[in-house]
Amino acid sequence: MMMRFLIAFLIAIGVGKLVSKLKLPAILGWLLAGMILGPHAIGLINQSLLDSVVYGRIINILECSVGLMIGTELVWKKIKSAGKQIIITTLTQSLGTFLFVSLVFGITFYFMKLPIYLAFLFGGIALATAFEFDDAPVVFAKKTQSINIDGEVYHTKVESFTHKRTYDVILSKKFLNEDDHVLIIDDFLANGCAMLGLIDLVKGSGATIEGAGVVIEKGMQNGGDLIRSQGVHLESLAIIDSMTDTSLTFRN
């Protein structure tokens, strides 16, 4: 029984290293290995092993290790040499990332009748992923002119489906140029106006669009189809196919 676990553990390490070579977090490789080796696929880790007392204790130790890793490596490593303001910002962003992703997956898993505690696991993965790419600059497109945006700007108009109004969205030209490779991130995707506006901004700069990601896509509206029809690789954490006052139906 334990030989099965040891073999699976070594395979997971190997898959994690392969994924890391693709410049992705190793934890994604570990998750992929678990899905393939688990009882719902090839069954190297079968249900009897998952139900064993020894395996349960090992998992408790590993869960504790993950918590320690997130708490030390992903927070204190960043704030040891930082000032007070940076400490506050780092903690806020770290907790914000964890709580937001956990909340989104918690709601999703509730309606899918899956264990809610898994949402916190995905929150931790999101936090680890965020720190994995902490060297990548983040640029925000603004709906209004602010004091930190001066000089020439890229400009586009975006119609808000939620607020039923049109915004002028701007981005300073000093933050984006033809040498950049851009991943566009937004929270919700409905009719696609906001995402299309951001795509227009990036294309106007001459930068390369590598893809786009949203937290929730409303699949019953045509925004996703519009984005994909432009050749943009779009990924959504959750896609809602239908919704009523009392229920949500997510795409499998």
Image: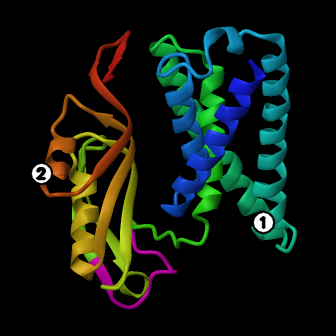
Residue 97 sits inside the magenta stretch:
no
Local packing at callout 1 (Cα closer than 10 Å; few below 14, some 14-19, many 20+) is some
Residue 148 sits inside the magenta stretch:
yes
Local packing at callout 2 (Cα closer than 10 Å; few below 14, some 14-19, many 20+) is few
Residue 229: give its label.
Answer: 2
Residue drawn 61% across the image and 15% down it: 46
Residue drawn 33% across the image and 22% down it: 252
Q: Where is residue 129 drawn, in percent x and y?
A: 59, 53
Given the current orientation, which residue lies at the most extreme bottom position? Answer: 151
Does any portion of residue 143 appear in the rendered image? Answer: no
Q: Nearer the viewer, residue 165 or 242?
A: 242
Q: Secondary structure at mark 2?
A: helix
**The magenta stretch spans which residues?**
143-154
| Prevalent SS, magenta region | loop
Q: Is residue 127 above or below residue 107?
A: below
Which residue bears the numbered disc 1?
A: 78
Look at label 1 and name its amino acid: Lys
Gap between marks 2 and 1 measured at Cα: 40 Å
Going by the image, does 104 lie left or right of 62?
Answer: left
